[in-house]
Image: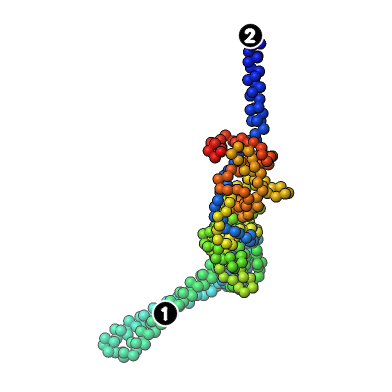
Amino acid sequence: MNKLVATLILPIAALALPTLAADAEARLVSTAQVENRPLSPKIMVIGSVHSRNNAELTTGVSGRLDWVQEAGTRVQAGDTVARLDKTRLELEHTEQQALIRREQINLTQLQRNFERLQQLSRSQSVSRNELDDASTALELAKSNLELARIKLDIIQDNINRTELKAPFAGIITNRLHQAGEDIGPAEAVVSLTDPEHLEIRLHAPLKHSRRVKVGDSLNIYHADGEFQASIRSLIPVSDVRSQTFEARLDLPGALDGSISVGELVSLALPIAPAQLTTLVPRDAIVLRSSGAFVFRINGDNKAERLAVTLGDGAGDWIAVQGQLQAGDRVVIRGAETLQDGQLVRFAPEQQQLAKGTS
């Protein structure tokens, strides 16, 4: 009985061996479809990272510096970054208060004199000219008192300015004057930069300024990778020498802390209208010393090696020229060790796709 079973099993096993061998030779791959999409030709330009808030702070009053914040110190909006000696201004403030009291006394006296003359005028004991002169003197006294109070407010404002405060949060990047120095009202004391709210500024050939507009997204290439940024403003004017225009782009919030003021980045700037272009995922490209190529899967589930010429990038996709059409399947995982003409098998999640396109 055992011999009969063995006799039946051996031929069946022999028939199954070619199938098992074929499955073992088939390489496991993942694929994606080739797409045709509009894409603009681009040139690479250099941009730089700037702070949207950067200022050299002045006090607006003259005086001797008592204290200046150290460079490199982080400050919050409203923090004091420098302090002037305010002794002279406080003396002026006291003097002006005394002048106001004197003007008030003078005004009170003129008011009483005017009221007395008004009563006498009813009995025609004073002339009309005398009453008019008293009224004019009273109005002038009121005006002098008002001017004195305004000057007191000016002095108080100058006293407040002796405490130089940060208008926004940031880092003191430079201390332009030291304690003990006398400064004028327009002399910068410290430089303050906001390292959190950043933007990218680029200067590109003026002839390409019409190819971009506010709101467009550009691909940015940085040491940490690639990202996109939107154009916030355009300055499409230039001078005779530079012949460049300026664009300013908002830096994505996700990059906070990974990029610093002053860093250089590369930007892909469109230079022509969009054209229908063949695109494949970047992962499909295999680079060798002989050039670039991709593996296309044919109807027999075999890999065909096709040479391609690379074009402009569009995020995770790249333009290619070669014998590819929209809808073709190209290998994006497992291509590095794949051979031309080799049988492939697909990842489980792509089995249905393979059946539908074969």
Quadrant (top left/top right/bottom left/bottom right) for the N terminus: top right
- What residue is pinned by disc 1? 143
In the rendered image, the residue lying farthest to the left is: 123
Depicted 27 relative to depicted 234: above or below: above
Amino acid carrying mark 2 in the image = Met
**Local SS, label 1:** helix
Amino acid carrying mark 1 in the image = Ser
Quadrant (top left/top right/bottom left/bottom right) for the C terminus: top right
Crowd around label 2: few <14 · some 14–19 · many ≥20 (10 Å):
few
Q: Give left or right: position of 133 versus 89.
A: left
Residue 188 in picture, x, y percent from top left? 61, 69
- What residue is pinned by disc 2? 1
Depicted 330 relative to depicted 203: above or below: above
Residue lying at 66% horizontally and 39% vertically, measured from the top left: 341
Residue lying at 54% horizontally and 52% vertically, measured from the top left: 37
**Local SS, label 2:** loop
Residue in the foreground of this view, choosing between 193 and 233: 233
Residue in the foreground of this view, choosing between 301 and 56: 301
Crowd around label 1: few <14 · some 14–19 · many ≥20 (10 Å):
some
Residue in the foreground of this view, choosing between 164 and 100: 164
Residue lying at 52% horizontally and 72% vertically, measured from the top left: 155
Q: Is residue 165 visible?
A: no
